[in-house]
Amino acid sequence: MAPHYQKLALASALLLALSACKDHAKPVEEIRPVRYVTAGEDTRSASRQFSGEIRARQESKLGFRVAGKVIAKRSNTGDIVKKGQVLAVLDATDYSLDSSAKQAALAAAQADLAQQDADLKRYRELLTQNFISAAQVERQQTATQAARARLQQAQAALAASHNQAAYTSLVADTDGVLSDISAEPGMVVAAGQIVARLAASGEREVLLQVPENAIADIRNATGFKVRLWANNRELSARLRELSGDADPATRTYPARLTLSGADDSVRLGMTTSVSATLASPPDKKLKLPLSAILDSQDKHYVWVIDAKSNKVGRKAISIGSIDDQYATITGGINGGERIVSAGVHLLRDGQRVSLLAK
């Protein structure tokens, strides 16, 4: 072969090799899987979800009715207690001394009344013999009545002193579980200071913390389903109480649901998820989840999926109102368009996507 033709053949071979390398190095188009919603379809549920905690229907905060120093703790947190059971005891020395003093005062009042009664009897005998005047008898009658009043006063003071001595024992006012007790021997407590919490046996409830934008939904809900996190058991419930004032710490409104069919397996403190069935169906306004909205340069956008090519395009939208989960769309998209609902910051115009199941 002539040298000229050899050079041409070699050049052709090189061009073919370079072309093959170029084709081989061509990047593979990235297809991103996305979740989507269809504009105009109601993506909201006819229920609202909350977290709750199992609590007793009746919960008592217990404290001593008198001040003193704790000398004995007879129950511990978590103990099952009976009505009348002693939970803790104060030093009753001072109250015993006070009772002794009141007992002595009562004895003195009884002796005084006996003396006044005897004097009144003698005065009446002397009056019949005209040895004294009627005025003297009347004064003695008054003295006797005063002595009788002092006796009644001493009796009441002694009874009150006995009560004070009895109050040195902290007693369970009902059957239940001692959910907390902070009284320890050596601790000095004031009258009325809370030192224990008692959850009464019997009816169980769910305590919810309701945000202010869900108050109407909770109040008007047609039913509640409570699912226990521990065993996935589901129970029905009804609203018993919804606070009219927000908790100062959490700024939420405590609500209590009464459980139906709760047994011993429903233990205090269990975590629950609560589903509240809304009283009315959601409205038909065009709404999108907040996760579908892309904010850029003080404007709002969504990614619209082309039905034929499955490519996305960014469209500007107008928003009317926003709640905790959804935005009301007032312009920019039409009903029936498919909108990317998650991962909006990872897409670009013209990117091909694959649709995940709803």
Image (cartoon, rainbow, N blue to C red):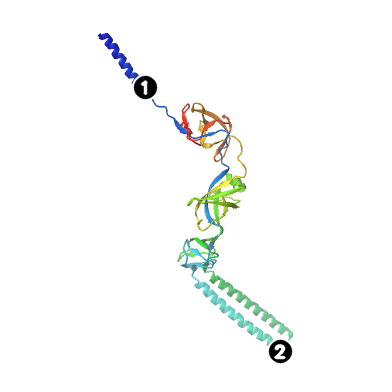
Where's residue 330, x and y in %? 59, 32
Q: Distance between the residues labelled 1 and 2?
A: 142 Å
Badge 1 vs badge 2, beta-carbon distance below 8 Å: no
Of 88 and 160, nearer the camera is 88
Extreme residue in the front direction: 1
Q: What element carries label 1?
A: helix
Q: Residue 150 carries which label?
A: none
Which residue: 47% across, 31% down? 354
- Residue 7 at x, y percent in the picture: 28, 11
Type of amino acid at the residue the image marks with label 1: Asp
| Residue 66 on image: x %, y % | 54, 67
Q: In this view, does 268 lie above or below 28?
A: below
Choose between 299 and 314: the one closer to the eye: 314
Asked if residue 8 shows in the view, the reply is: yes
Determine if residue 242 is in view.
no
Q: Which of marks 1 and 2 is nearer the N terminus?
A: 1
Q: State which quadrant residue 100 falls in.
A: bottom right
Q: Residue 173, position in %: x, y?
A: 55, 65
In front of the other: label 1 or label 2?
1
Within 10 Å of disc 2 (Cα), the crowding (few <14, some 14-19, many 20+) is some
Quadrant hosting residue 151: bottom right
Label 1, on which residue?
23
Q: Which amino acid does label 2 sit on?
A: Glu
Mark 1: few/some/many CA within 10 Å (<14, 14-19, 20+):
few
Outermost residue to the bottom: 129
For the residue pair 43 and 13, the one nearer the viewer reads as: 13
Name the residue carrying label 2: 125
Identified at 30% across, 16% down, the residue is 13
If the image is split into quadrants, where does the N terminus sit?
A: top left
> Is label 2 in a helix, a strand or a loop?
helix
Asked where in the image residue 213 lies, by quadrant, the reply is top right
